[in-house]
Amino acid sequence: MFDIGVTKLAIVGGIALIVIGPEKLPGLARTIGTMLGRARRYVAEVKEEVNRSMDLEELRKAQSTLQEAAHAVQHSIDESAAAIENSIAEAKAKEALSGPVPYYSTYRPVKKRWRAKIGATPQWYKARNGVRTRALSGAARVARFRPPKTSA
């Protein structure tokens, strides 16, 4: 930008010392320094604001692309749902045309054996670790833990 060397700065400083005088030169240097600091801060703020606006513009672009992708996904989901609904309607129409379904081909839920008490833990593991595998009644539990009779 500027081609300023040490010799040119020394010449400018010498001329300023002669023109302004030694009493006012420190105050002038201080004023020039504060003005340069303000200018640098102003330039830094402008750069930061420009960067922020560029980032904001990039975020808006990313948001618009994401919204377009979301709309495309929503559209594809709606199309597949409509296709599934059509196939279900066709199946119901075929079923209605074919007549009633025989009793033996209807789905019957499996009856669960809730009394069976079948767990996922193997019996050998329960036996090795001392886990009870059978429930005891109250009378059996009392009889099991009753102290032995002593003959006297």
Image: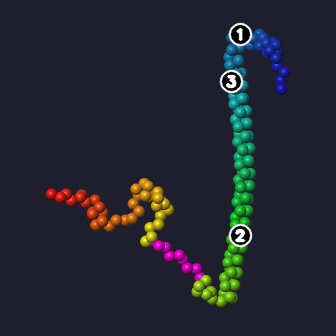
Find residue 29 and report its horizontal and vertical position in percent. 71, 18
Q: Looking at the image, which is closer to me, 109 or 100?
A: 109
**Where 50 sits versus 111, above or below?**
above
Q: Looking at the image, which is closer to me, 47 or 27?
A: 47
Q: Residue at x 68, y 81 (%)?
A: 91
Q: Is residue 73 magenta?
A: no
Give the residue type at disc 1: Pro
Q: Which residue is mark 3?
A: 34
Specify the principal SS of the magenta part: loop
Which segment did they paint magenta? 106-114
- Graded by Cα atoms within 10 Å as few (under 14), some (14 to 19) or many (20 or more), the crowding at tag 1 reads few
Residue 22 numbered mark, or none? 1
Q: Residue at x 49, y 73 (%)?
A: 112
**Where 108 sits versus 62, above or below?**
below
User: Which comes before the other along the chain, label 1 or label 3?
Assistant: 1
Residues marked 3 and 2 touching at CB (< 8 Å): no
Q: Which residue is mark 2?
A: 80
For this view, does 54 lie left or right of residue 149? right
For this view, does 36 lie left or right of residue 146? right
